[in-house]
Image: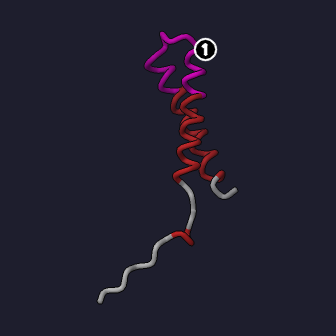
Amino acid sequence: MKRFKIVIPIMIIVAILATWILAKDHSAVPLQTRILIIAGGTLLSGIITYFLSQQDGDGVDPKPENK
């Protein structure tokens, strides 16, 4: 559940930025297509963030000892 504290805000930021950029620079794209692009980008960023923000502190290898 701790990862969702990071994933949800990033998804919201991506959705807001995608909406703004598509409305500003690509207004010729139909609204339905823009909504699909925004939803796809939001979901993809959420999935990537979820897997990249894994907190596996026990799986860290110990430092090798210098001999």
User: Above or below — where is 56 with respect to 44?
Assistant: below
Magenta residue check for 50: no
Label 1 neighbour load within 10 Å: few <14, some 14-19, many 20+: few
Percent from the top left, x then y, of residue 22? Answer: 49, 22
Over which residues does the magenta segment extend?
A: 20-39
User: Above or below — where is 34 with respect to 42?
Assistant: above
Q: Residue furthest front?
A: 67
User: Above or below — where is 46 with respect to 55?
Assistant: above
Percent from the top left, x then y, of residue 32? Answer: 61, 14
- SS of the residue at dot 1? helix
Read off the residue under disc 1: 32
Image quadrant assignment for residue 40? top right
Q: Camera-side residue: 16 or 41?
A: 41
- Main SS, magenta region, reads helix
Q: Quadrant of the N terminus?
A: bottom right
Q: Camera-side residue: 10 or 44?
A: 44
Q: Residue furthest left?
A: 67
